[in-house]
Image (spheres, grey):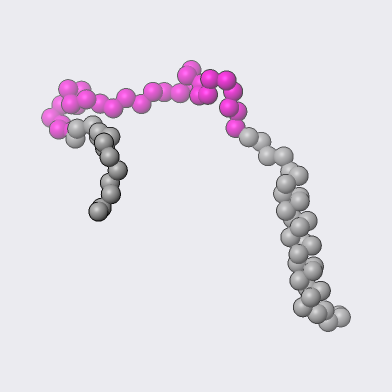
Amino acid sequence: MTEKSVRELEKELKNARMRDSEEHRRTVRKNRDFSVGGIDKDTTVEKKIPDTADVPDAILLPKRRRQKKENIPW
């Protein structure tokens, strides 16, 4: 085996990284289907939060309200 200098090894590493990144850029990856309308309403189920009247003997926390201003500590 021949001894290689640090510069030659750095050049080889740089070339290998460039080849790898070029190959990664060239590959076509399948993307999700974002057709018109977004989410298909036929296949998704709407999540409903139960109310206190729906669950017997349960006290649920009130629904979270949006803050009127940012939470700034000073």
Looking at the image, which residue is at 86% across and 80% down? 1
Quarter of the image where one finds residue 19: bottom right
Looking at the image, which residue is at 36% across and 26% down? 47
Q: Position of residue 41 (x, y in %)?
A: 47, 19
Residue range (magenta):
32-60
Q: Is residue 65 left or right of residue 19?
A: left
Q: Position of residue 23 (x, y in %)?
A: 76, 50
Looking at the image, which residue is at 25% across and 53% down? 74
**Residue 24 sits inside the magenta stretch:** no
Q: Position of residue 64 (x, y in %)?
A: 25, 34
Q: Main secondary structure of the magenta part?
A: loop
Out of 39 and 44, give the one closest to the viewer. Answer: 39
**Residue 36 sits inside the magenta stretch:** yes
Q: Is residue 73 above or below residue 69?
A: below
Q: How many marks?
A: 0
Out of 69 and 66, give the one closest to the viewer. Answer: 69
Looking at the image, which residue is at 57% across and 20% down? 36
